[in-house]
């Protein structure tokens, strides 16, 4: 299976490395406006192939996307000093339009994964642009809160003494400050959190919850403060999504996708538990959360919709 990655910065190149190490594709093409960077990243990853899995990885142009089932978009402009968020969104919208126009010509049946931040806004814009080129919304997916959900499960696992892959817990809403940790629906091996901590005699008070919430919600800020950017976690999330789509595994993940309505907010793109398979987004699952979490999800949807309204007003 062939994967195209557009944008060979830290997220794009780390995703390529994670895909190669996970053996979820046998061919990867890296594309970047800086071709020397793409060539260098491809060569560097090639040198790890003898220690992992045979993968044909190389740098190329858009024509080399031919035959790719999945296209990862990790390209985008960074915010410059004095530049407003709306100006940055406008710039990245233009970049996305150019990329989508190329994809539509070369691989019109591909599934597109958006990894560029702000991922919810840019996924929404990509869906709008995609409609112009005949892309159905279910084939355009943002990485959304997949990484936040992973962080939630890791921190819960550390406290509970359970492997994260045996914990069902989700972060929904915006991939950002207004994200919602769904405490009311945590299960460990099918057992509700309350029953698990009672049976195992584990302390789980408000201070523990506050610490975990802080660790999830502010993880990116802390990592960026320490080393400048985050890329390993999101690289792993992208590799998992590629694997799920490639194998049509039908896995529930908190990806960012277009919704006609979320908690009374119309026409918004955010993360909810979603069934992912070989055709992309197979459908959003019902959000069976408590009243407080529903209120927080509505607020998160309103924040995203507000940002989209600003952007849409600017480009009129």
Image (spheres, rainbow, N blue to C red):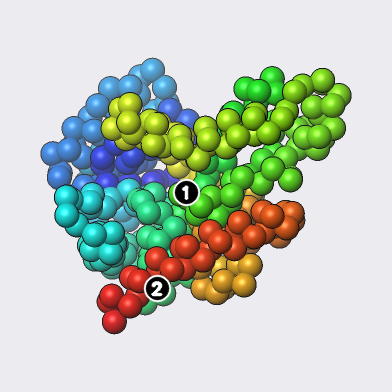
With respect to residue 70, does 286 lie above or below?
A: below
Name the residue at 53% across, 50% down: 179
Q: How far from the left and from the top, in percent, is residue 271?
A: 55, 55
In the rendered structure, the answer to whether residue 141 lies left or right of residue 8 reads right
With respect to residue 79, does 165 lie above or below?
A: above
Q: How far from the left and from the top, in percent, is residue 244?
A: 56, 44
Which of 247 and 112 lies nearest the eye of the viewer? 112
The image quadrant of residue 25 is: top left
Where residue 247 is drawn, which disc sits there?
Answer: none
Q: Tag 1's secondary structure?
A: loop
Name the residue at 79% across, 27% down: 197
With respect to residue 57, does 203 lie above or below?
A: above
Marks 1 and 2, the one that precedes in the sequence: 1
Residue linked to disc 1: 177
Whether residue 248 can be seen here: no
With respect to residue 70, does 303 lie above or below?
A: below
Q: Residues within 10 Å of mark 1 (few under 14, many from 20)?
A: few
Q: How far from the left and from the top, in percent, is residue 84?
A: 24, 59
Residue linked to disc 2: 309
Whether residue 265 can be seen here: yes
Q: Residues within 10 Å of mark 2 (few under 14, many from 20)?
A: few
Name the residue at 15% across, 45% down: 34
């Amino acid at each position: 299976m062939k994967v195209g990655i557009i944008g060979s910065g830290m997220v794009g190149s780390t995703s390529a490395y994670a895909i190669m190490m996970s053996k979820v594709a046998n061919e990867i093409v890296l594309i970047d406006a800086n071709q020397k960077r793409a060539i260098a990243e491809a060569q560097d990853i090639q040198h790890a192939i003898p220690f992992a899995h045979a993968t044909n990885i190389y740098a190329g142009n858009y024509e080399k996307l031919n035959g790719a089932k999945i296209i990862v978009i990790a390209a985008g402009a960074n915010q410059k000093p004095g530049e407003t968020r709306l100006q940055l969104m406008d710039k990245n919208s233009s970049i996305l339009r150019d990329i989508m126009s190329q994809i539509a010509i070369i691989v019109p049946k591909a599934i597109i994964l958006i990894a560029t931040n702000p991922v919810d806004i840019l996924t929404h814009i990509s869906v709008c642009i995609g409609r112009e080129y005949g892309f159905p919304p279910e084939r355009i997916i943002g990485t959304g809160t997949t990484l936040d959900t992973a962080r939630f499960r890791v921190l819960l696992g550390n406290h509970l003494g359970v492997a994260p892959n045996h914990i069902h817990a989700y972060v929904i809403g915006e991939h950002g400050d207004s994200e919602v940790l769904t405490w009311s629906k945590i299960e460990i091996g099918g057992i509700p959190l309350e029953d698990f901590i009672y049976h195992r005699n584990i302390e789980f008070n408000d201070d523990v919850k506050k610490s975990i919430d802080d660790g999830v919600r502010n993880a990116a800020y802390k990592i960026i403060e320490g080393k400048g950017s985050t890329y390993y976690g999101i690289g792993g999330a992208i590799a998992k999504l590629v694997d799920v789509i490639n194998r049509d595994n039908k896995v529930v993940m908190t990806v960012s996708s277009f919704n006609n309505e979320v908690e009374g907010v119309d026409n918004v793109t955010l993360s909810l538990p979603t069934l992912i398979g070989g055709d992309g987004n197979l459908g959003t699952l019902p959000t069976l959360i408590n009243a407080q979490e529903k209120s927080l999800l509505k607020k998160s949807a309103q924040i995203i919709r507000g940002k989209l309204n600003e952007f849409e007003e600017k480009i009129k």
